[in-house]
Amino acid sequence: MSTKVWFITGASRGFGRVWAEAALKRGDMVAATARKPEDLAALVRDYGDAIQPLTLDVSSRESVFAAVESARQRFGRLDVVVSNAGYALFGTIEESNERDSRVQFETNFFGTLWVIQAVLPHLRAQGSGHILVTSSIAGIITFPTAGIYNASKWAVEGLTETLSQEVGDLGIRVTLVEPGGYATDWRGPSAAHTTAMPAYNGLRAKLEASYGNRVLGDPQATAAAILKVVDEAKPPLRLFLGNAALPVAQRVYAERLATWEAWSAVSQGAQGVASK
């Protein structure tokens, strides 16, 4: 198996860190980005010239393009691009102010868009490459008190699925990675929170009680799945991580199909008669 060159955003912690180290351990090369380059110091110490640490805030389009160009200049090519940087804003729709909502989209959605736009000219010139975008189970279903986060991931899903249709004939593969619940700091230091309104205290209490028996996955266990996907000649467009996502998706999609079918007569009646 030939050595691959990776470009990974959000590589300082969580999934990005796990996947960067997994790639390095097997002998691949990684351009790893983080807001604070010192967070990558241990990887640099352990893997030396195989890793290129880059300071990056993905909400800056100019900075993203510069980082991608720096990685291409350093390694000569890009084989696997992982748009992973992101975070969650927790709060109900009513509690989410304009600034926090815009910043959430600047990172989760526009950060992904800038990475994709920056790497595409290089991947097209190569006639090869694999773009992985970290989405979430929250990109296909929704959870109360995370509405803006949910919306940003649904936008990422639409963007990335469209991308797969546009570049499939150019030798570029695309995969949406959709983790379920994992023991990362997604709800901890990485998260942002709105100012809580007492009106939603009952909802929060109910949600907290429902999460009591939840078993979170081990982020380290995702490495093998990611390595398998990037080595596949025909990888999936969507990949769930963990054992919780599929049952939830099956239930929600069954409910959606049942609703659409129950209202099909109304839907078809809305077609009207085409004018000639």
Image (tube, rainbow, N blue to C red):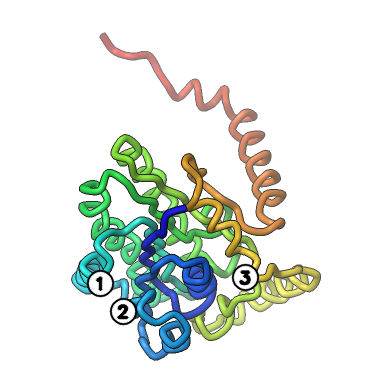
Q: Give how far apart the Cα atoms at labels 3 and 1 are.
A: 26 Å
Q: Give how far apart the Cα atoms at labels 1 and 2 are.
A: 7 Å
Do residues under tags 1 and 2 come within 8 Å of each other at their CB atoms?
yes
Decide if residue 263 is on the left or right side of residue 155: right
Foreground pick, 137 / 173: 173
Q: Amino acid at mark 2?
A: Leu
State the image coordinates of residue 252 (x, y, percent, origin top left).
65, 46
- What residue is shown at x 40% (from left), y 66% (from top)? 108
Q: Residue furthest right?
A: 213
Mark 3 or mark 1, which has the lower sequence index? 1
Q: Which mark is residue 67?
A: 1
- What residue is shown at x 67% (from left), y 41% (from top)? 255
Q: Give how far apart the Cα atoms at labels 3 and 2 are.
A: 23 Å
Image quadrant in which you'd find residue 47: bottom left
Location of mark 3 (residue):
219
Q: Which mark is residue 54?
A: 2
